[in-house]
Amino acid sequence: MLKSMLYFTKYANNKFDILNKHEVYFRREEVEDAVSAPDNLRKSGKNYFAHKDRVGVVYEKDGEEIKIITFYPIK
């Protein structure tokens, strides 16, 4: 469980619909899980890149606040 306040940007929220149009489906819980318990994590500048199972997530962290910028399918 995340202790930080996590929220999705407007673009990240819209990304669910964008991917659904291409028959790629994710649940919010899958995206949040990739952030809270990633299999692979790296940082570049102010962005973090987390991978777990079949989802990649780009997010920023500012103190206790985590802002999910986007997410995408991975193989």
Image (cartoon, rainbow, N blue to C red):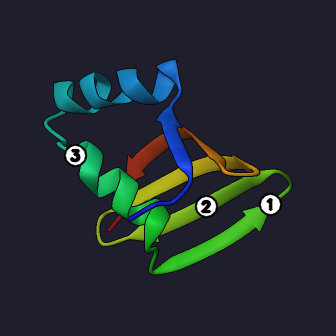
Mark 2 Cα-neighbour bin, 10 Å: few <14, some 14–19, many ≥20:
some
Assess whether mark 2 and mark 1 are in contact (beta carbons under 8 angstroms): yes
Q: What is the number of the mark on residue 60?
A: none
Q: Residue at x 56, y 53 (%)?
A: 4
Q: Separation of disc 1 and disc 2 at Cα?
A: 8 Å
Circle 3 residues within 10 Å: few <14, some 14–19, many ≥20: some
Structural distance between the alpha carbons of marks 1 and 3: 25 Å
Disc 3 secondary structure class = loop
Q: Tag 3 or tag 2, which sits nearer the N-term? A: 3
Mark 2–mark 3 CB contact (< 8 Å): no
Amino acid identity at mark 1:
Ser
In the picture of the structure, the residue carrying the numbered disc 1 is: 44
**Residue hosting label 3:** 26
The percent coordinates of residue 73 (x first, y second) are 34, 53
Q: CA distance from mark 2 to mark 3?
A: 17 Å
For label 2, the residue is 49
The amino acid beneath tag 3 is Phe
Give the vertical position of 2 relative to 41 (above or below).
above
Q: Disc 2 on helix, strand or loop?
A: strand
Query: What amino acid is labelled 2 in the image?
Result: Phe
Q: Residue at x 25, y 23 (%)?
A: 17
Mark 1 vs mark 2: which is more N-terminal? 1
The spot of residue 14 in percent (x, y) is: 37, 20
| Left-right relation of 71 to 30 | right
**Residue 32 quadrant:** bottom left
Closest to the observer, 64 or 9: 64
| Quadrant showing the C terminus | bottom left
- Place of residue 23 in the rendered image (x, y in percent of width and height, measured from the top left): 13, 36
Which residue lies at the image location 46% right of the left edge and 66% below the top edge?
Answer: 36
